[in-house]
């Protein structure tokens, strides 16, 4: 996949997320107004609010991970808020380590890497994201990992199979986008931990 195709795909991702976040925000505002005006509370309303919140969180996350990324900075509070919202109800506990603002392009890589590590931990666990002297590390700990070696090989070879599923696209994108930033993805997989560096 050429650089122009990656950029075009990122712009498409940004456009879709941008166009979806407004109506989802409007639905959420409508639900809040119904609640304030004494609308009928109940499990149905709770389910709608939970679903809208989940959709909003995912779109915010995907906008960073799959959208176009310039060199604008993202503050810690915004990053932590996105991760917290998207992981709500998940079996994963994710800790964002960097205390200072980070370039959006680096956060994009971290978010794509988090999607990769998440696939190896379907039974839950903890993922710590740290950055030291420009080197990023995602360190996942779990009682049990589920590794699809074919997917993890893509990070080293940059050669995605033709039957790659949409839910696995992060494995194809991460090494290509990292390469554009003169970075290389390196993984270490143990019995109960996984490390992904870039």
Image (cartoon, rainbow, N blue to C red):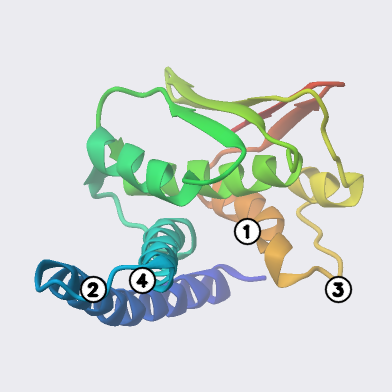
Of 73 and 89, which appears nearest the observer?
A: 89
Which numbered mark, 2 or 4, is in the foreground of this view?
4
State the separation of the CA atoms marked 1 and 2.
Answer: 36 Å
State the separation of the CA atoms marked 1 and 4.
Answer: 37 Å
- Residue 26: where, in percent of width, then height? 21, 78
Residue 173 marker: 1
Residue 31 marker: 2
116 in relation to 49, above or below: above
Q: Are marks 1 and 2 in contact (CB under 8 Å)?
A: no
Which residue is disc 4 drawn over?
45
Which residue is disc 3 drawn over?
162
Name the residue at 52% across, 75% down: 9
Of 98 and 184, which appears nearest the observer?
A: 98
Q: Earlier in the sequence, mark 1 or mark 2?
A: 2
Q: Earlier in the sequence, mark 4 or mark 3?
A: 4
Label 4 CA crowd tier, 10 Å (few <14, some 14–19, many 20+): some
Name the residue at 85% across, 40% down: 146
Q: Are marks 2 and 3 in contact (CB under 8 Å)?
A: no
State the separation of the CA atoms marked 2 and 3.
Answer: 43 Å
Look at the image and tell me in which quarter the N terminus lies: bottom right
* Residue 75 is at least partly visible in this image: no
Which numbered mark, 1 or 2, is in the foreground of this view?
2
Q: Are marks 2 and 4 in contact (CB under 8 Å)?
A: yes
Q: Earlier in the sequence, mark 1 or mark 4?
A: 4
């Amino acid at each position: 996949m050429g650089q122009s195709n990656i950029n075009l795909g990122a712009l498409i991702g940004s456009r879709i997320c941008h166009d979806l976040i407004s109506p989802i925000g409007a639905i959420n505002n409508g639900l809040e107004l119904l609640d304030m005006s004494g609308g009928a509370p109940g499990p149905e309303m709770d389910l709608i609010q939970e679903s809208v919140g989940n959709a909003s969180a995912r779109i915010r996350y995907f906008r960073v991970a799959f959208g176009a990324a310039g060199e604008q900075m993202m503050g810690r509070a915004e990053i932590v808020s996105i991760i917290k919202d998207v992981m709500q109800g998940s079996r994963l506990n994710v800790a964002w380590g960097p205390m200072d603002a980070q370039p959006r392009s680096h956060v994009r890589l971290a978010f794509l890497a988090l999607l990769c590590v998440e696939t190896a931990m379907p039974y839950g666990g903890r993922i710590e994201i740290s950055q030291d002297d420009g080197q990023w590390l995602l360190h996942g700990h779990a009682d049990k990992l589920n590794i699809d070696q074919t997917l993890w090989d893509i990070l080293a070879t940059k050669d995605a199979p033709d039957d790659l599923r949409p839910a696995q696209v992060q494995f194809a994108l991460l090494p290509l986008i990292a390469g554009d930033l003169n970075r290389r993805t390196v993984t270490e997989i143990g019995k109960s931990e996984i490390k992904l560096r870039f």
